Image (spheres, rainbow, N blue to C red):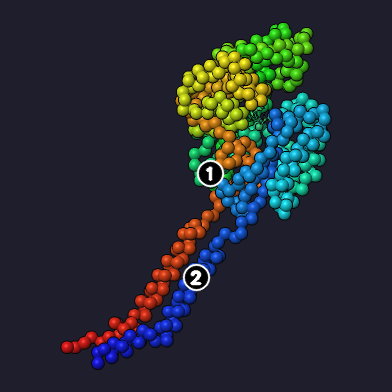
């Protein structure tokens, strides 16, 4: 009798109503999870592109950036996918033949057409920013600089990209955008982390940019750039020294050495055994030194080396003016600068030179770095050439001078100490993108960094799907539990024995 009853009760669980409810419940959960997964699955990734030409004093480089199309406003997603070094000198060197400046860009522009998908060409913005070489040409001969821009603009207009113009960046912009690039690539802006200072050493100018607790811009408004990025306010200290890029400082040092107007220059910044005949007119052909040309100098001079780091450093120090600071503190040439603070990334020539000299490790004490450089400078020129047969002779001849200038600029110029020197990192790239002003410039012009922090989803995609699944299962279990009165054991009557 009791077995029969049990059978009947079990069958209750198998009633059509219970089966239908269970099936609908399972279908509902599967549908819910499927929709959740599909709805939030990233769409087929499409990319957008931007191109920036960095028309530097020594050469022009093209950079292509890429970012997922639906993430225009999101954090840290723009990456450099390609770079192309334009053959020949910087555009400012084409002052006497401007059309050639435009033509020089064509090879890299062709390359860019192959790298950016064809269907994106028309919508891809193309910018050209010129720095110290064009600043100097503009000072020297503004109509020549206009003609160069005219020719370059005409050449770029012919490309299939959306050309947005060619212009000279101010020194402030160059410094500030370099700082934005470094901190954007390190995700420091989006996460509101302590920022990294930026040190850029070009051929004709150099920039220093950093955040200092003691700097609010009031003491020297010309050195202050304010930003609001991802909901945080920044008051950046930045300064650009025109004529203090390494090529122009080499001219300044040589100008000092040739003041006597005699035909021989024994240069402590070049290796002993180095000897080249150079033109006075070429040396003095720059507004950085043109006023110092000795009168009655012969056409050429013999530039020979004597490889002495300490004497080279003495010569280099002469290009800085440490008197006449009208502020609480200065770097040099009467320019206000707060004490350096926090970590720094040093790129461009800082990296090329220190990397060549095997001196990128800043945990090595500064004194040891100087000893190593002293030995390097004292190595005869023929040995140096034998050791580096593949390095361009022009670069090779100048590493002793450049290394000496870098150490002198950092310690005497910017007041890095033996301690704070170790806060500097010599870098070329960050996560595959070159450190430099170009990325920051493009991010700014495409409004890619929002002033306020973007709304972020509460949960990442995987977390969201798991959450929906767990809640759905929970609801289902609750539903089944709510059917408890229909369960066989619950509908059993208590047995009175
Ligand atoms: N050793 C070495 N030097 C380089 C290399 N590329 C550029 N330089 C030199 O390093 C210095 C700085 O180069 P860049 O940072 O490209 O300078 P730039 O942008 O042309 O100049 P600015 O307009 O002043 O910024 C120049 O003297 C260049 O000749 C390289 O690959 N190796
Ligand atoms: Ca540069």
Residue at the image position 70 percent from the left and 8 percent from the top? 264
Is residue 451 or residue 85 the one in the foreground? 85
| 252 sits to left or right of 199 | right
Residue at the image position 42 percent from the left and 66 percent from the top? 470
- First reached walking from the N terminus: tag 2 or tag 1: 2
Q: Residues within 10 Å of mark 1 (few under 14, many from 20)?
A: some
Q: SS for tag 1?
A: loop
Q: Quadrant of residue 298?
A: top right
Q: Residues within 10 Å of mark 2 (few under 14, many from 20)?
A: some
Which mark is on residue 462? none
Is residue 245 or residue 87 the one in the foreground? 87
Quadrant location of the N terminus in the rendered image: bottom left
Q: Is residue 339 above or below residue 278?
A: below
Q: SS for tag 2?
A: helix
Residue at the image position 61 percent from the left and 12 percent from the top? 272
- Residue that numbered label 2 is attached to: 32
Q: Is residue 33 above or below residue 207?
A: below
Q: How many marks?
A: 2
Point out the quarter of the image occupied by ligand 2.
top right
Q: Is residue 411 above or below residue 273?
A: below
Q: Position of residue 295 (x, y in %)?
A: 77, 10
Q: Depth-wise, is mark 2 or mark 1 nearer the camera?
A: 2
Residue at the image position 77 percent from the left and 16 percent from the top? 281
Which mark is on residue 187? 1
- Can I make out residue 145 in this image? yes
Query: Farthest residue in the bottom direction?
Result: 1
Q: Position of residue 376 (x, y in %)?
A: 55, 18
Q: Position of residue 217 (x, y in %)?
A: 57, 33
């Amino acid at each position: 009798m009791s077995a029969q009853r049990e059978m009947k009760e079990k069958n209750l669980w198998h009633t059509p109503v219970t089966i239908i409810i269970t099936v609908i419940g399972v279908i509902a959960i599967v549908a819910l999870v499927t929709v959740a997964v599909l709805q939030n699955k990233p769409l087929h990734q499409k990319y957008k592109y931007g191109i920036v030409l960095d028309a530097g004093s020594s050469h022009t480089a093209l950079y292509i950036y890429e970012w997922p199309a639906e993430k225009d406003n999101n954090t840290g997603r723009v990456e450099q996918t390609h770079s192309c070094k334009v053959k020949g000198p910087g555009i400012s060197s084409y002052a006497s033949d401007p059309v050639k400046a435009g033509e020089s860009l064509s090879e890299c522009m062709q390359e860019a057409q192959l790298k950016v998908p064809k269907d994106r060409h028309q919508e891809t913005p193309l910018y050209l920013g010129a720095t110290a070489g064009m600043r100097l040409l503009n000072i020297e001969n503004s109509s020549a600089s206009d003609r160069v821009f005219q020719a370059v603009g005409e050449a770029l207009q012919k490309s299939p990209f959306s050309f947005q113009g060619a212009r000279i960046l101010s020194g402030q912009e160059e410094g500030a955008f370099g700082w934005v690039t470094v901190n954007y690539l390190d995700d420091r802006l989006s996460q509101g982390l302590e920022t990294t200072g930026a040190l850029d050493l070009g051929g004709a100018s150099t920039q220093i940019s950093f955040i200092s607790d003691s700097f609010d811009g009031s003491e020297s408004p010309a050195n202050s750039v304010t930003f609001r990025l991802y909901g945080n306010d920044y008051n950046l200290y930045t300064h650009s020294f025109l004529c203090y890029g390494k090529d122009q400082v080499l001219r300044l040092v040589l100008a000092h050495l040739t003041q006597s107007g005699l035909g021989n220059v024994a240069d402590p910044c070049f290796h002993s055994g180095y000897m080249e005949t150079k033109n006075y007119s070429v040396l003095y052909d720059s507004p950085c030194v043109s006023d110092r040309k000795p009168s009655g100098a012969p056409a050429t001079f013999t530039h020979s080396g004597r490889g002495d780091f300490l004497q080279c450093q003495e010569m280099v120090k002469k290009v800085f003016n440490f008197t006449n600071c009208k502020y609480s503190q200065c770097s040099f040439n009467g320019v206000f600068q707060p004490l350096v603070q926090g970590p720094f990334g040093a790129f461009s020539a800082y990296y090329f030179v220190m990397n060549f000299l095997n001196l990128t490790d800043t945990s090595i004490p500064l004194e040891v770095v100087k000893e190593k450089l002293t030995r390097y400078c004292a190595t005869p020129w023929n040995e140096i050439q034998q050791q580096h047969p593949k390095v361009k002779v022009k670069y090779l001849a100048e590493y002793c001078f450049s290394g000496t200038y870098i150490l002198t600029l950092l310690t005497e110029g910017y007041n890095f100490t033996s301690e704070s020197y170790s806060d500097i990192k010599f870098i070329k790239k960050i996560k595959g993108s070159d450190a430099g002003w170009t990325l920051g410039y493009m991010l700014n012009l495409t409004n890619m960094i929002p002033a306020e922090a973007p709304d972020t989803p509460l949960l990442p995609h995987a977390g969201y799907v798991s959450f929906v699944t767990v809640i759905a299962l929970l609801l289902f279990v609750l539903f089944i539990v709510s059917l408890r009165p229909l369960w066989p054991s619950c509908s059993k009557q208590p047995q009175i024995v």
